[in-house]
Amino acid sequence: MIIVMKKSATDGQVDRVVEWIESVGYRAHLSRGTERTIIGAVGDARGREQIRSVAHLPGVENVVPILKPYKLASREFREQDTVVRVGGVEIGNGSFTVMAGPCAVETEEQLMECAYVAKKAGAQILRGGAFKPRTSPYSFQGLEEAGLKLLKKVRERTGLPVVTEVVNPADVDLVEAHADILQIGARNVQNFALLKRVGQARKPVLLKRGMMTTIEELLMSAEYILSEGNPDVILCERGIRTFETATRNTLDLSAVVVLKQLSHLPVIVDPSHAAGHWKYVAPLARAAVAVGADGIIVEVHPEPEKAVSDGMQSLKPEKFYKLMEDIGVLESAMRQVRANS
Amino acid sequence: MIIVMKKSATDGQVDRVVEWIESVGYRAHLSRGTERTIIGAVGDARGREQIRSVAHLPGVENVVPILKPYKLASREFREQDTVVRVGGVEIGNGSFTVMAGPCAVETEEQLMECAYVAKKAGAQILRGGAFKPRTSPYSFQGLEEAGLKLLKKVRERTGLPVVTEVVNPADVDLVEAHADILQIGARNVQNFALLKRVGQARKPVLLKRGMMTTIEELLMSAEYILSEGNPDVILCERGIRTFETATRNTLDLSAVVVLKQLSHLPVIVDPSHAAGHWKYVAPLARAAVAVGADGIIVEVHPEPEKAVSDGMQSLKPEKFYKLMEDIGVLESAMRQVRANS
Amino acid sequence: MIIVMKKSATDGQVDRVVEWIESVGYRAHLSRGTERTIIGAVGDARGREQIRSVAHLPGVENVVPILKPYKLASREFREQDTVVRVGGVEIGNGSFTVMAGPCAVETEEQLMECAYVAKKAGAQILRGGAFKPRTSPYSFQGLEEAGLKLLKKVRERTGLPVVTEVVNPADVDLVEAHADILQIGARNVQNFALLKRVGQARKPVLLKRGMMTTIEELLMSAEYILSEGNPDVILCERGIRTFETATRNTLDLSAVVVLKQLSHLPVIVDPSHAAGHWKYVAPLARAAVAVGADGIIVEVHPEPEKAVSDGMQSLKPEKFYKLMEDIGVLESAMRQVRANS
Amino acid sequence: MIIVMKKSATDGQVDRVVEWIESVGYRAHLSRGTERTIIGAVGDARGREQIRSVAHLPGVENVVPILKPYKLASREFREQDTVVRVGGVEIGNGSFTVMAGPCAVETEEQLMECAYVAKKAGAQILRGGAFKPRTSPYSFQGLEEAGLKLLKKVRERTGLPVVTEVVNPADVDLVEAHADILQIGARNVQNFALLKRVGQARKPVLLKRGMMTTIEELLMSAEYILSEGNPDVILCERGIRTFETATRNTLDLSAVVVLKQLSHLPVIVDPSHAAGHWKYVAPLARAAVAVGADGIIVEVHPEPEKAVSDGMQSLKPEKFYKLMEDIGVLESAMRQVRANS
């Protein structure tokens, strides 16, 4: 923590700040510049919150934190990439994983057809929502337990591992019993009660960045899960909220690069929710490969115009087949790029 | 719903859109302009989601929703202002309600002192967090049940009704047994499982706008609570996330005006979390009176530099006394403004 | 400037950074913490840009600037409030100045009627655009020189000083010859060629914050004007761009408080452009008084539904009369608030 | 334009709106729904602004524009991609153009070295700023005319066409005499006086999106240039301002996809300014290829740590060589992707 004193700060005020820093168990390093006195406060994380209150002392202009607030999620804690294993699939091992399926589980037929399309195209994991967090209480809220049972059934028939969202701490056991990856949606990225609970689960967690979550906050949310003992967290960039309205959200592909530098956790991209329109999904998915993401999660629906939820952003099967081909071409290119480094 | 066809749309494409609209139980109104054909789709809310998928049909350029997605929260549903009654306090009756207290309940002494300051200054409701949703898993997470007991005790001794946050659906009964108003924090504004659960409670709910929540989405979150049967929702503007970093968040006081026009629910302001620094709290609280808010919720702490959480944004007692005087002066002014209308 | 080294930085890397700092004429202060070595770089502003490039050196994690980049605009440079004098009007002397008039000058009749309404209501300054920066090349671009002549004529007849926008460095002399205050619009806040040119003018400048401008950048833009020799800059908060679409922009009233703390320059508010709808203008204008602004600039039009530009956000005369009464009531209240401090 | 009436609107109010629409030369199409009456207003663009003022009439709830406000920039106006020709280079013809060079022209040696690196690596165009719009008046403002002369000299020696920024309408002739492409920087994207002036130039214009400019506004700014007679506009996405601070701006790659759909103009990407740090430049440049951009403009400097401006985001030559190889690999992949469509 760096404390910047006002230009007009007196020696007495500087002394009082130093005293106060020491009173909360930190050490103070004084550095007098031509225009400002700067005081470094060195100590461990426990005093971190209290130390910020030094801002109340007279003569203090500003308080600048220096250390990152997350540990287990950081590259410094673990230099090697974390690889999350689900069924036979490895996420984060340098290959590109595709999770595909409908926004919501609707019927057995719909889910089986999606799984068939996903498998035929070469996707490794099936997505599908049984609990749907919807902006409106009057919108379809998902098939809930019945939806989970369908997911399990289709998984058994097709061999595709399944990722599905959990929204209530009370449902974590149930979802864990039916699915292979527990998804935390963007709106729950700071639902800390839920994060703690999935941190106690034994299945990997797919953690989506919230629409207004900074990269640092996303890593702090991952830290909640990791610190409860679950090491298998997959981060997901899915678009942030900006002033631009031409797309549903603004996909922040730089976040993939920053996250992979700051953290050892795998990072995937959700182009469907980011764009909000199927027309934009394929180019963004290709860009996700080229930027170095570990995979995508993408909405596919046999008849998007009949989907009960998010039909506008779902790809039809033939578009998805083409996208999977293109992803293959770009993956080869990226292997060459990496080989040349 | 308005469907805007492309300039190049053929008659056959227009016909297919009309057909499709009718197939989901809506009626279609055709309107041919010089540059575009526009089709109005009229029906009830149930088809609302599916109708959007018309965007997949060839020739469609854009789909524009016309109706507001909330009903119970709207001024059209209920023209008169809702007044929420808590103990002897009425929120939303034209007066200005002040809720004050520490960010977090720390000790009995701290809470009693805060309550004493709040009461002496003329605040009507005591705030204090027992469950603290913190960005970091390593930060103080609140005294939890012990904190609730302290709140109840202090409420009994001082007669001040108490507002406190609930973060897990499983805790709603417990919090309801100890507090007078259940607070939903900004990070849980779209935690729909929690919203549904407090919608079944019999105590009023203070619903904070999220950092990334639009006004319409806030009203949809209120709709979740109202639609479960709880009519007593107090909305709270607490700052949104923008590119500006001089303040913790950007307090959106226009939202107060817009909300009071669109909805019958009372609207209060949290200047402490918005500003993130005690220096900015008093002017923003005064502005809240002048803009027509129904009250504020503000952080007060006897020794902010020793607070375990958010000390930087807490007012010291003497600053709070002055603020309460100023609020009184501005309230008189606003009574005159209203009398002149 | 603070240079934060990586946890893994070697002694050699630290030495090289220190050497490099000294090579650009700065002094280096070393501070070794338990987790990080931090190096303070002390020198004058000229090396400021180059010093940032230290980020390229191996072992450097982060570079944190400490000093504010503006000087003449800062409270530290000049502790007392700047009062800008225009005709008999003083802006920034503790009173509340109202600038009112149409968005665009349309005809002599329209302008005279606006001036009449403004004067009758007690506004001190007449606003009106002759050069209109419009998003569309097909929109009315203003009467240009003819509009300036009308402004001058109406000023002579009514005695009201006039504020009008200038958009091209080549027009500054012309505008200066006709108006009392030169306005720099939000879209030109970082048009540095224009800022330098009005910095050489002898009339005060009303500098609007851009939709995307941070508080610090606004002060840097003021610094451009001040550093060219023009001491009379009035800052204007007019709403920033956020994800919220219910209002045209989000009025950032906290910016008023922050600006008045960081700078000695007067700060006014434009509630018309911020809100984008006349319904929201009056409450926001009242809030501007209560938050401590030095005035407002507001759009008034005798027949808003016939205005050639921004009719939706213009107040009708009767609404403006009521607003001016309300502002008077709130000004009295604020005098009492200040007297009690 | 669609006018949505309030639920409570009377027949008389509906009649008055229809009357008013017809009074400004539009035709009105009435459509009565179960909850709302909707009125379509059909006419030409000239009445567009005035028609919005219908919002003032009693009973009107909302006014929704339907038509796009730009014409010449739209895909509807010109279906085929515009190809901009500069020297022997074609921008927008399906290949990927790389513009590279220093942020600012510093010395002849520096510029020659950059040009050498750019040419050796296979870049087609040399970038370099002679007029530098800087946030601070105390920062290096560019070599101005002397810089232009250096650019011309290096262009003659190397044969590389040159792109450089113009910031003042008064300098357009001068810049046009020395450079091949006139750049409008992000801060001048709505400097309409400047846009009109470069619209009269005979050299192509590289128009950067502002940090807070919507896609629609960017196209409106292009429209300013096109409507003055200059058909050669290259759009450039360079990052928008969001709440995220880990990168200087948030590169909005979806904007490339949306722009290419809405407009026939070529679209390039500036990963250097978006990211603000050289570490993030290469992955974002690769993503630009994969998303379908027509090129990039990227900062390269022989000794970034000695650059007078933006050194932190400049690539060193060896990193740039590797990037150019990688771009080649991805271009081949994209050719295959396109061939398969």
Image: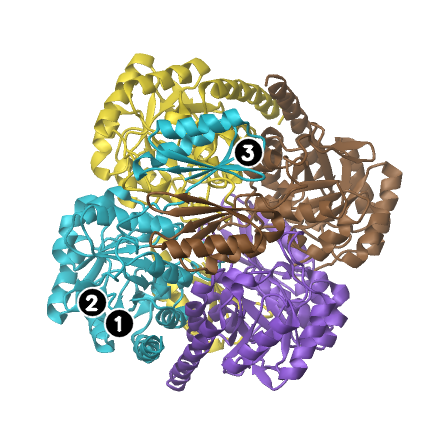
Chain colours: A yellow, B cyan, C purple, D brown
Looking at the rendering, which quadrant does residue C48 occupy?
bottom right
The three-letter code of the residue at mark 1 reads Ser
| Few, some or many residues within 10 Å of mark 1 (<14, 14–19, 20+) | some
Q: Chain of mark 2?
A: B
The three-letter code of the residue at mark 3 reads Lys
Q: Chain of mark 1?
A: B
Local SS, label 1: loop
Quadrant where the image shows the C terminus of chain C: bottom left
Q: Chain of mark 3?
A: B
**How many numbered callouts?**
3
Q: CA distance from mark 1 to mark 2?
A: 8 Å
Give whichever of B80, D322 is nearer the camera. Answer: B80
Residue assigned mark 3: B6
Local SS, label 3: loop
Residue assigned mark 2: B90
Give whichever of discs 1 and 2 has the lower sequence position: 2
Please provide percent x and percent y for residue D150.
85, 48
Instruction: Single out the mark in the foreground, 2 or 3.
Output: 3
The three-letter code of the residue at mark 2 reads Glu
**Location of residue A154 with respect to C34 vertically, above or below:** above
Callouts 1 and 2 close, C-beta under 8 Å: yes
Quadrant where the image shows the N terminus of chain C: bottom right
Local SS, label 2: strand
